[in-house]
Image (cartoon, rainbow, N blue to C red):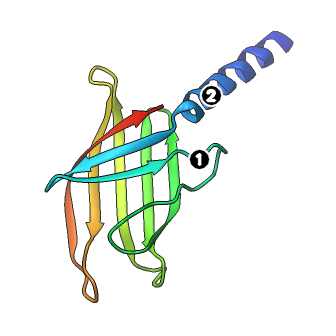
Amino acid sequence: MKRAAIVCLTSLLALHAGAASAKSITCSYPADQELTFEVPKKQGGLPPIDFDYPSKVTLFSFRDDNLLVVAMDESDKSRVRVVISAQRDKAKGIYAGQIVTDLGGNQLMLDNGPVTCKVKG
């Protein structure tokens, strides 16, 4: 029983270390646009994001071969600005999925398309 607990704990630490070792993620999406953000050092942390409109990440998950980022408008917290959902493609060494962005000023202007994210670090 004690050995099983040690094996589980070691596995969890290895998973956490793998995600924590990544320093930044760069996501490329249509119209030659890129979005780069730092991976938080602390599990449960939220990275700052540099988007066309002031936005704040409210949900970030980078584990189990999945990447999920949700960023809301800083002044209107009910307005979604960026959603990235991507899964790791082990053969290509990238995360591939979908991105939804709102590039509208006063009006909602959603754009949806493929995204490719590379982890550096």
Circle 2 SS class: helix
Disc 1 is placed on an element classified as loop
Q: Nearer the viewer, residue 38 or 5?
A: 38
Q: Check the image and report above or below for 24 versus 12.
A: below
Q: Residue furthest left?
A: 31
Name the amino acid type tagged 2.
Ala
Q: Position of residue 85 (x, y in %)?
A: 36, 49
Q: Residue furthest right?
A: 2
> Which residue corresponds to mark 1?
40
Q: Quadrant of residue 112?
A: bottom left
> Looking at the image, which residue sits at the far top?
3
How packed is label 1: few (under 14 Cα within 10 Å), some, or many (20 or more)?
A: some
Left or right: where does residue 95 sit relative to residue 72?
left
Q: Which residue is mark 2?
A: 17
**Would you say residue 1 is visible in this rendering?**
no
- Please say if the residues under marks 1 and 2 sit with CB atoms less than 8 Å apart: no
The reply to whether residue 88 is in sight is yes
Q: Position of residue 101 (x, y in %)?
A: 28, 65
